Image (tube, helix red, strand yellow):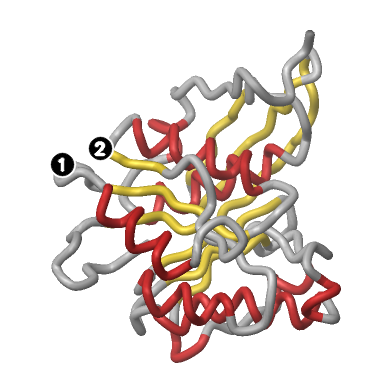
Amino acid sequence: FLQNSGNVMDRTIAVLQGLLVLIGCFQFLRIRLQAFQKICHTEIDIHGNILPENIGLQCLVAEIPENAEIGVIELGMSEPGEMTRIANVARVNCAVVTNIGVAHIQQLGSKENILKEKLHIQDGMSEDGTLFLNGDDPLLRNVIPENGRKKILYGLSEGCDYRGEDLHLENGHPVFTAVHGDEKVQLHLEVMGVHMVQNALAALAVAGEYGISMEKLSLIHISEPTRLQLI
């Protein structure tokens, strides 16, 4: 989420990082928030290989309409030092990291280095910011945020703040019970793939922390017409 940068905006922006499940998470978060807030979302990621990251991000923020309450944006990196440059422009106060994969491992050398680079999203983050992390990823699960920032885990594993239980398939679609504290809600996803459960939980976690209950979110129909559909 982005803070006001040079009076360009005074709104909340959801920032996502990851690879394998990022697009699905992006769609879940966008659609669920859109049901309750006026949001603006990006169609491509801000990445040094697409646009120079500082210029691209500044242009994107400037294009967010004044009536938008929340923006959903994807930030990516592929080399050491790139995330710090992006974070210092974005001035985030909240971010979702979906996984630590092996993309860009040639430039960064190891998954541990990829994790370290992704966590530089905190370089521009307010001290009361929040990291939403995939608790099923062993590297992300053990992250300790800098300067006492808040950490929220989502996933299927024990100990996750937003957890999925009783996962099964119905006609090829995931069905599971989302649990947060004393709140439990069953969700039927309209997209294919068990990995989409993590995307849904990430969206539930972000929306929940911004005051939208899981019960309300469970009523929203989500499908992606161009991906993971039966033909």
Q: Quadrant of the N terminus?
A: bottom left
Is 66 or 178 nearer to us in this picture?
66
Quadrant for the C terminus, please: top right
For the residue carrying disc 1, how many other residues have a C-alpha within 10 Å: few (<14), some (14-19), or many (20+)?
few
Toward which corner of the image does residue 199 lie, by quadrant?
top right
Q: Residue at x 67, y 46 (%)?
A: 198
**Residue 61 vs residue 119: left or right?**
left
- Determine crowd level at label 2: few under 14, some 14-19, many 20+ residues with C-alpha closer than 10 A: few
Amino acid tagged 2: Lys
Residue 10 spot, x, y in % from top left: 18, 60
**Mark 1: secondary structure:** loop
Residue sitting at 58 percent across and 21 percent down?
223
Residue 72, placed above or below residue 39: below
Give the quarter of the image for residue 79.
bottom right
Question: On the image, numbered disc 2 is attached to which residue?
Answer: 38
**Residue 204 at what x, y percent from top left?**
49, 45
Q: Callout 2: helix, strand or loop? A: loop
Q: Give the residue pinned by disc 1.
A: 67
Decide if residue 11 is in sight here: yes
